Amino acid sequence: MTIRPGQLCRKVILCKPSANTQKGEYGEPVKTFVDGPKVSARIRQNGGREFYAAQQLNSEISTEVVIRYRPEITSAYQIKRGSVLYEVVAPPVDLYDQRRYLILSCKVLS
């Protein structure tokens, strides 16, 4: 896969997990995220699937996001583009081990 800089034409916000956790309605810890830097990215939807969980039909859209290399990105991050929120579901892949681009496997949350 060859990536040209012109293909990184979408602006996204990298959201990192907050250090201080908040409590939910029943006292359970709730993950919170802090907006980080705005970066250029390429977003490509790989497909979707439907599955049953808790006796309900659910759907999930898998997405691949490519950004320039950033060493701090982990699978705990989220990505925001407009009103769409993506969750990084796997460790980032360093394309060709050249520290130029990261491939992030994501799923759409909203």
Image (cartoon, rainbow, N blue to C red):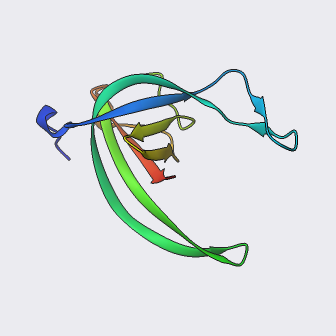
On the image, the x and y values in percent for residue 73 come to: 47, 28
Residue 99: image location, x then y, percent: 31, 25
Question: Height in image: 60 above or below 10?
Answer: below
Q: Residue at x 57, y 75 (%)?
A: 51
Q: Residue at x 35, y 50 (%)?
A: 64
User: Left or right: where does residue 86 sit relative to residue 100?
Assistant: right
The residue lying furthest to the right in this view is 27
Q: Position of residue 37 (x, y in %)?
A: 39, 21
From where the camera sits, is residue 63 visible?
A: yes
Seen in the picture, residue 38 relative to 45 is either above or below; the reply is above
Res 69 visible: no
Say which of 68 and 24 sits in front: 24
Q: Is residue 2 above or below residue 108?
A: above
Q: Position of residue 106 (x, y in %)?
A: 45, 49
Q: Which quarter of the figure has residue 56?
A: bottom right
Residue at image coords 44%, 62%: 61
**In the image, what residue occupies the spot 73% across and 72% down?**
54
Q: How many marks?
A: 0
